[in-house]
Image: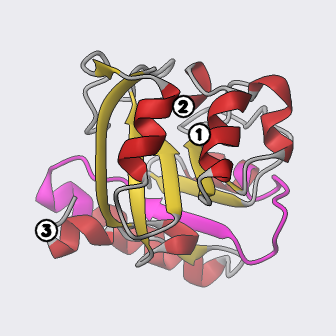
Amino acid sequence: MKVNELFYSLQGEGHFAGTPATFVRLSGCNLQCDFCDTRHTTGTEMSEEEIVAEASRYPARHVVVTGGEPALQLTPSFIGRLHDAGMFVQIETNGTLPLAGGMEGTVDWITCSPKYGMIPEIQRMDELKVVFDHTHPEYISRLGQVQTCHEDTYYLQPCDRGERDWNMVNLKACIRYIMEHPKWRLSLQTHKILGIR
């Protein structure tokens, strides 16, 4: 598997915000969003065994497999190895690709973070975490109809374009939208606020 980075930190976003976790960021993505802060082509080839061994060095048992788009590389055997090592496995996917080999039934938590214009294709979502862009409110409205496994796991996360003025307008619009549509909860990128990875 091509790994962009592997590190230990706190989950900064969504349902598990504040949870200590090992992050396995896989290289490659099928969308290449312009606001993404991940370099999709760089990485180191590692075997599944090497990744599990590295993740096992850290005290937390929560592993977040993210990207890029992890569905491009994830395998049932990798998920099985993580479980055998006593890990709780969360994946973060854009939802446009199926999870091979029945993985939807074996992963512990699926965070789906669709990007503008995309409606998720995967069948199971434990959490829907949508990047909020105030210029596309009709898209957020459509995603509000998507079903997750839990009633309280609909999150809007203000898009960070690295432009302070735009970000502030977008944050205020996101808060206003949530106040008007209380199905949604606010997800902030707290790792950026705290200055951690």
Screen quadrant of the C terminus: bottom left
Left or right: residue 12 versus residue 167 is right
Place of residue 41 in the rendered image (x, y in percent of width and height, measured from the top left): 29, 15
Query: Label 1 vs label 2: CA separation?
Result: 6 Å
Place of residue 147 in the rendered image (x, y in percent of width and height, measured from the top left): 85, 56
Give the mark nearer the N terminus: 1 vs 2: 2
At a point 54% along the width and 38% down the height, the residue shown is 115
Q: Quadrant of residue 87?
A: bottom right
At a point 48% along the width and 42% down the height, the residue shown is 52
Question: In the rendered structure, which segment of residues is drawn in magenta?
Answer: 143-168
Q: Residues within 10 Å of mark 3 (few under 14, many from 20)?
A: few
State if disc 2 and disc 1 touch (CB < 8 Å): yes
Query: Label 2 vs label 3: CA separation?
Result: 25 Å
Q: Tell me the residue that label 1 is attached to.
A: 93
Q: Residues within 10 Å of mark 1 (few under 14, many from 20)?
A: many
- Viewer-proximal residue, 106 or 127? 106
- Viewer-proximal residue, 126 or 4? 4
Left or right: residue 171 versus residue 116 is left
At a point 83% along the width and 47% down the height, the residue shown is 124
Q: Residues within 10 Å of mark 2 (few under 14, many from 20)?
A: many
Give the mark nearer the N terminus: 1 vs 3: 1
The label shown at residue 70 is: 2
* Amino acid type, label 3: Gly
In the structure shown, which secondary structural element does the residue marked by tag 1 occupy? strand
Q: Tell me the residue that label 3 is attached to.
A: 195
- Viewer-proximal residue, 177 or 17? 17
Left or right: residue 194 versus residue 30 is left
Place of residue 171 in the rendered image (x, y in percent of width and height, measured from the top left): 34, 69
